[in-house]
Protein backbone atom coordinates (compact mmCIF):
# COMPACT_ATOMS: atom_id res chain seq x y z
CA UNK A 1 0.00 0.00 0.00
CA UNK A 2 1.31 3.46 -0.92
CA UNK A 3 2.69 5.38 2.06
CA UNK A 4 0.51 8.48 1.41
CA UNK A 5 -2.58 6.64 0.14
CA UNK A 6 -5.65 8.86 0.56
CA UNK A 7 -3.45 11.87 1.35
CA UNK A 8 -3.74 15.45 0.13
CA UNK A 9 -0.85 17.82 0.78
CA UNK A 10 -0.08 21.53 0.50
CA UNK A 11 3.53 22.26 -0.45
CA UNK A 12 4.90 25.83 -0.54
CA UNK A 13 7.91 26.76 -2.64
CA UNK A 14 6.75 24.06 -5.04
CA UNK A 15 8.06 25.65 -8.23
CA UNK A 16 11.60 24.40 -7.86
CA UNK A 17 14.35 23.12 -5.64
CA UNK A 18 13.23 20.90 -2.81
CA UNK A 19 9.57 21.92 -3.04
CA UNK A 20 9.18 20.26 -6.43
CA UNK A 21 10.92 17.13 -5.17
CA UNK A 22 8.57 16.96 -2.15
CA UNK A 23 5.52 17.25 -4.43
CA UNK A 24 6.71 14.44 -6.69
CA UNK A 25 7.82 12.11 -3.89
CA UNK A 26 4.56 12.54 -1.95
CA UNK A 27 2.54 12.03 -5.14
CA UNK A 28 4.52 8.88 -5.96
CA UNK A 29 3.29 7.55 -2.64
CA UNK A 30 -0.34 8.37 -3.34
CA UNK A 31 -0.93 11.99 -2.29
CA UNK A 32 -2.83 14.61 -4.27
CA UNK A 33 -1.02 17.94 -4.21
CA UNK A 34 -1.69 21.66 -3.88
CA UNK A 35 1.54 23.15 -5.23
CA UNK A 36 2.08 26.79 -4.29
CA UNK A 37 4.76 29.25 -5.34
CA UNK A 38 5.11 32.96 -6.01
CA UNK A 39 3.59 32.83 -9.51
CA UNK A 40 1.75 30.60 -11.96
CA UNK A 41 4.89 30.32 -14.08
CA UNK A 42 6.53 27.62 -16.18
CA UNK A 43 8.39 26.24 -13.19
CA UNK A 44 5.22 25.68 -11.19
CA UNK A 45 3.53 24.20 -14.26
CA UNK A 46 6.44 21.78 -14.62
CA UNK A 47 5.94 20.65 -11.02
CA UNK A 48 2.23 20.10 -11.70
CA UNK A 49 3.03 18.10 -14.84
CA UNK A 50 5.46 15.92 -12.89
CA UNK A 51 2.88 15.27 -10.17
CA UNK A 52 0.19 14.41 -12.71
CA UNK A 53 2.62 12.04 -14.44
CA UNK A 54 2.53 9.95 -11.26
CA UNK A 55 -1.25 9.64 -11.65
CA UNK A 56 -2.15 11.99 -8.80
CA UNK A 57 -4.09 15.26 -8.95
CA UNK A 58 -2.29 18.60 -8.71
CA UNK A 59 -3.79 22.08 -8.28
CA UNK A 60 -1.40 25.03 -8.49
CA UNK A 61 -1.68 28.19 -6.41
CA UNK A 62 0.22 31.47 -6.47
CA UNK A 63 0.97 33.70 -3.49
CA UNK A 64 3.83 35.18 -1.53
CA UNK A 65 3.85 33.34 1.81
CA UNK A 66 4.75 36.60 3.54
CA UNK A 67 1.33 37.99 2.57
CA UNK A 68 -1.08 36.18 4.88
CA UNK A 69 -4.28 37.34 3.20
CA UNK A 70 -3.09 36.50 -0.31
CA UNK A 71 -1.84 33.13 0.85
CA UNK A 72 -5.10 32.24 2.58
CA UNK A 73 -7.11 33.24 -0.51
CA UNK A 74 -4.86 31.16 -2.78
CA UNK A 75 -4.94 28.11 -0.51
CA UNK A 76 -8.71 28.34 0.02
CA UNK A 77 -9.25 28.43 -3.75
CA UNK A 78 -6.84 25.61 -4.50
CA UNK A 79 -8.19 23.28 -1.81
CA UNK A 80 -11.73 23.94 -3.06
CA UNK A 81 -10.58 23.11 -6.59
CA UNK A 82 -8.91 19.93 -5.33
CA UNK A 83 -12.18 18.98 -3.68
CA UNK A 84 -10.76 17.34 -0.59
CA UNK A 85 -9.39 18.28 2.79
CA UNK A 86 -5.65 18.31 3.49
CA UNK A 87 -3.85 15.59 5.42
CA UNK A 88 -0.45 17.32 5.43
CA UNK A 89 1.03 20.80 5.11
CA UNK A 90 4.66 21.16 4.03
CA UNK A 91 5.97 24.67 4.81
CA UNK A 92 8.99 24.61 2.55
CA UNK A 93 9.26 28.05 0.86
CA UNK A 94 12.30 29.99 1.94
CA UNK A 95 14.88 32.57 0.86
CA UNK A 96 18.56 33.06 1.57
CA UNK A 97 19.64 36.57 0.76
CA UNK A 98 22.87 38.56 0.87
CA UNK A 99 24.93 37.43 3.84
CA UNK A 100 27.29 39.47 5.97
CA UNK A 101 28.26 40.11 9.60
CA UNK A 102 25.12 40.75 11.65
CA UNK A 103 25.79 44.44 12.15
CA UNK A 104 26.12 45.02 8.38
CA UNK A 105 22.95 43.30 7.20
CA UNK A 106 20.65 45.58 5.26
CA UNK A 107 17.42 46.13 7.24
CA UNK A 108 15.37 45.24 4.17
CA UNK A 109 17.26 41.94 3.79
CA UNK A 110 16.73 41.19 7.49
CA UNK A 111 13.01 41.97 7.25
CA UNK A 112 12.48 39.90 4.10
CA UNK A 113 14.26 36.89 5.62
CA UNK A 114 12.04 37.00 8.71
CA UNK A 115 8.90 37.75 6.65
CA UNK A 116 9.35 34.73 4.38
CA UNK A 117 11.26 32.21 6.49
CA UNK A 118 9.42 32.72 9.80
CA UNK A 119 6.21 34.71 9.36
CA UNK A 120 5.60 32.95 6.02
CA UNK A 121 5.65 29.60 7.82
CA UNK A 122 3.16 30.89 10.38
CA UNK A 123 0.91 32.07 7.54
CA UNK A 124 1.26 28.70 5.80
CA UNK A 125 0.18 26.82 8.90
CA UNK A 126 -2.75 29.21 9.42
CA UNK A 127 -3.92 28.79 5.83
CA UNK A 128 -3.31 25.04 5.70
CA UNK A 129 -4.55 23.84 9.08
CA UNK A 130 -7.94 25.44 8.36
CA UNK A 131 -8.35 22.78 5.66
CA UNK A 132 -7.04 19.75 7.54
CA UNK A 133 -9.19 16.73 8.14
CA UNK A 134 -10.90 15.94 11.41
CA UNK A 135 -8.85 12.73 11.42
CA UNK A 136 -5.66 14.65 12.20
CA UNK A 137 -2.64 15.13 10.00
CA UNK A 138 0.92 16.33 9.78
CA UNK A 139 2.60 19.72 9.48
CA UNK A 140 6.20 19.56 8.29
CA UNK A 141 8.28 22.73 8.49
CA UNK A 142 11.52 22.88 6.52
CA UNK A 143 14.05 24.59 8.75
CA UNK A 144 17.81 24.11 8.26
CA UNK A 145 20.97 23.21 10.11
CA UNK A 146 20.93 27.00 10.53
CA UNK A 147 17.98 26.35 12.86
CA UNK A 148 20.24 24.28 15.13
CA UNK A 149 23.65 25.95 15.01
CA UNK A 150 24.95 29.37 14.09
CA UNK A 151 26.00 30.33 10.59
CA UNK A 152 28.29 33.34 10.91
CA UNK A 153 27.23 35.98 8.33
CA UNK A 154 23.69 34.60 8.14
CA UNK A 155 22.01 35.80 11.33
CA UNK A 156 18.96 36.92 9.34
CA UNK A 157 18.52 33.35 8.07
CA UNK A 158 19.61 31.54 11.23
CA UNK A 159 17.30 33.60 13.46
CA UNK A 160 14.32 32.76 11.25
CA UNK A 161 15.26 29.07 11.01
CA UNK A 162 15.66 28.85 14.80
CA UNK A 163 12.37 30.73 15.10
CA UNK A 164 10.36 28.09 13.25
CA UNK A 165 11.50 25.51 15.81
CA UNK A 166 9.82 27.53 18.55
CA UNK A 167 6.78 27.93 16.34
CA UNK A 168 6.65 24.19 15.66
CA UNK A 169 7.01 23.26 19.33
CA UNK A 170 4.18 25.63 20.22
CA UNK A 171 1.97 24.36 17.39
CA UNK A 172 2.64 20.76 18.45
CA UNK A 173 1.18 21.62 21.86
CA UNK A 174 -1.77 23.49 20.40
CA UNK A 175 -2.67 20.91 17.74
CA UNK A 176 -1.88 17.64 19.52
CA UNK A 177 -5.41 17.17 20.83
CA UNK A 178 -6.64 17.28 17.21
CA UNK A 179 -4.07 14.60 16.29
CA UNK A 180 -2.22 17.08 14.10
CA UNK A 181 1.53 16.57 14.46
CA UNK A 182 4.10 19.31 13.86
CA UNK A 183 7.78 18.60 13.23
CA UNK A 184 10.75 20.38 11.68
CA UNK A 185 13.30 19.08 9.17
CA UNK A 186 16.86 20.40 9.25
CA UNK A 187 18.76 19.85 5.99
CA UNK A 188 22.43 20.63 5.57
CA UNK A 189 23.63 21.67 2.12
CA UNK A 190 21.21 20.59 -0.62
CA UNK A 191 21.84 20.79 -4.37
CA UNK A 192 19.23 23.41 -5.32
CA UNK A 193 19.40 26.86 -6.90
CA UNK A 194 19.56 28.30 -3.36
CA UNK A 195 23.21 27.26 -3.03
CA UNK A 196 24.24 26.32 -6.58
CA UNK A 197 24.88 29.88 -7.74
CA UNK A 198 27.92 32.09 -8.26
CA UNK A 199 27.12 34.38 -5.35
CA UNK A 200 27.14 31.46 -2.92
CA UNK A 201 30.33 30.09 -4.47
CA UNK A 202 31.99 33.50 -3.89
CA UNK A 203 30.77 33.62 -0.29
CA UNK A 204 32.11 30.13 0.35
CA UNK A 205 35.49 30.86 -1.23
CA UNK A 206 36.37 34.45 -0.30
CA UNK A 207 40.03 33.90 -1.21
CA UNK A 208 39.34 32.99 -4.86
CA UNK A 209 38.59 35.37 -7.74
CA UNK A 210 36.17 33.25 -9.76
CA UNK A 211 35.34 30.20 -7.64
CA UNK A 212 33.75 27.29 -9.44
CA UNK A 213 31.16 24.79 -8.28
CA UNK A 214 34.03 22.39 -7.59
CA UNK A 215 35.73 24.96 -5.35
CA UNK A 216 32.49 25.48 -3.40
CA UNK A 217 31.95 21.73 -3.21
CA UNK A 218 35.36 21.24 -1.60
CA UNK A 219 34.52 23.79 1.10
CA UNK A 220 31.12 22.31 1.83
CA UNK A 221 32.44 18.72 1.83
CA UNK A 222 35.02 19.73 4.45
CA UNK A 223 32.14 20.65 6.80
CA UNK A 224 30.45 17.22 6.62
CA UNK A 225 31.21 13.89 8.29
CA UNK A 226 30.11 11.92 5.24
CA UNK A 227 32.21 12.39 2.10
CA UNK A 228 29.74 14.52 0.12
CA UNK A 229 29.46 18.25 -0.52
CA UNK A 230 25.69 18.29 -0.63
CA UNK A 231 22.72 15.99 -0.72
CA UNK A 232 19.95 15.76 -3.33
CA UNK A 233 16.52 17.36 -2.83
CA UNK A 234 15.03 13.85 -2.97
CA UNK A 235 17.02 12.87 0.14
CA UNK A 236 15.18 15.57 2.06
CA UNK A 237 11.87 14.62 0.42
CA UNK A 238 12.20 11.13 1.87
CA UNK A 239 12.39 12.61 5.37
CA UNK A 240 9.42 14.88 4.60
CA UNK A 241 7.53 11.81 3.35
CA UNK A 242 8.25 9.94 6.58
CA UNK A 243 6.98 12.86 8.69
CA UNK A 244 3.93 13.41 6.46
CA UNK A 245 2.95 9.74 6.56
CA UNK A 246 1.48 7.66 9.37
CA UNK A 247 4.85 5.95 9.77
CA UNK A 248 5.72 8.81 12.15
CA UNK A 249 2.28 8.91 13.76
CA UNK A 250 3.57 9.38 17.30
CA UNK A 251 6.25 11.94 16.46
CA UNK A 252 5.43 15.56 17.18
CA UNK A 253 7.45 18.56 18.27
CA UNK A 254 10.66 16.91 17.08
CA UNK A 255 13.53 18.05 14.89
CA UNK A 256 14.85 15.64 12.25
CA UNK A 257 18.32 16.42 10.95
CA UNK A 258 19.50 15.34 7.49
CA UNK A 259 22.88 16.96 7.03
CA UNK A 260 25.62 14.40 6.19
CA UNK A 261 26.91 15.02 9.72
CA UNK A 262 27.35 18.80 9.43
CA UNK A 263 25.95 19.57 12.88
CA UNK A 264 27.91 16.76 14.58
CA UNK A 265 31.35 17.42 13.13
CA UNK A 266 33.99 18.40 15.70
N1 LIG B 1 19.36 24.41 -0.42
C1 LIG B 1 19.87 24.25 0.80
O1 LIG B 1 21.07 23.98 0.95
C2 LIG B 1 18.99 24.34 2.01
C3 LIG B 1 19.50 23.84 3.22
C4 LIG B 1 18.69 23.88 4.34
C5 LIG B 1 17.41 24.37 4.29
N2 LIG B 1 16.94 24.86 3.10
C6 LIG B 1 15.56 25.34 3.10
O2 LIG B 1 14.81 24.48 2.28
C7 LIG B 1 13.69 25.18 1.73
C8 LIG B 1 13.68 25.01 0.22
O3 LIG B 1 14.89 25.59 -0.27
P1 LIG B 1 15.47 25.30 -1.72
O4 LIG B 1 16.90 25.00 -1.55
O5 LIG B 1 14.60 24.36 -2.45
O6 LIG B 1 15.34 26.77 -2.31
P2 LIG B 1 15.13 27.27 -3.83
O7 LIG B 1 15.55 28.68 -3.83
O8 LIG B 1 15.77 26.32 -4.75
O9 LIG B 1 13.55 27.16 -4.01
C9 LIG B 1 12.70 27.90 -3.17
C10 LIG B 1 11.32 27.97 -3.79
O10 LIG B 1 10.51 28.76 -2.91
C11 LIG B 1 9.86 29.77 -3.65
N3 LIG B 1 9.67 30.94 -2.83
C12 LIG B 1 10.62 31.80 -2.38
N4 LIG B 1 10.06 32.78 -1.67
C13 LIG B 1 8.73 32.56 -1.68
C14 LIG B 1 7.64 33.23 -1.12
N5 LIG B 1 7.81 34.37 -0.43
N6 LIG B 1 6.40 32.73 -1.28
C15 LIG B 1 6.20 31.59 -1.99
N7 LIG B 1 7.22 30.90 -2.55
C16 LIG B 1 8.47 31.39 -2.40
C17 LIG B 1 10.79 30.05 -4.82
O11 LIG B 1 10.10 30.68 -5.90
C18 LIG B 1 11.32 28.66 -5.15
O12 LIG B 1 10.48 27.97 -6.04
C19 LIG B 1 13.85 26.63 2.17
O13 LIG B 1 13.06 26.86 3.32
C20 LIG B 1 15.32 26.72 2.55
O14 LIG B 1 15.58 27.74 3.47
C21 LIG B 1 17.69 24.86 1.98
Image (cartoon, rainbow, N blue to C red):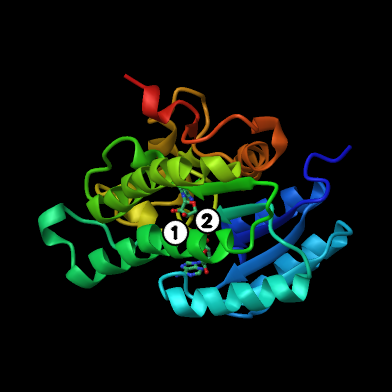
Write down the quadrant of residue 115 in the picture.
bottom left
Tag shown at residue 98:
none
Where's residue 76, x and y in %? 62, 74
**Going by the picture, which residue comes out furthest to the top?**
266
**Mark found first going from the N terminus, 2 or 1:** 2
Determine crowd level at label 1: few under 14, some 14-19, many 20+ residues with C-alpha closer than 10 A: many
Give the residue at mark 2: 91
The CB of the residue at mark 2 lies under 8 Å from ligand 1: yes
Q: Residue at x 46, y 57 (%)?
A: 194
Left or right of residue 89, residue 101 in this image:
left
Q: Residue at x 53, y 66 (%)?
A: 127
Callout 1: SS: helix
**Going by the picture, which residue comes out furthest to the left?**
103
Does residue 38 appear in this view?
no
Q: Nearer the viewer, residue 50 or 189?
A: 50
Q: How many marks?
A: 2
Q: Residue at x 35, y 42 (%)?
A: 146
Give the residue at mark 1: 121
Label 2 with label 1: CB-CB less than 8 Å? yes
Amino acid sequence: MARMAGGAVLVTGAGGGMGRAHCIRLAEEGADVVALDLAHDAALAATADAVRATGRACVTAAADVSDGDALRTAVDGAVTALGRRLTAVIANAGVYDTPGPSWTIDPAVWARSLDVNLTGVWHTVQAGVAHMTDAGGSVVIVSSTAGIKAIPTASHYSAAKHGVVGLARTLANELGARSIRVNTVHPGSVATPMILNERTFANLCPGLDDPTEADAAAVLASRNLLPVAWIAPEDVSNVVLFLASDESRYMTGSQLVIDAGLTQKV
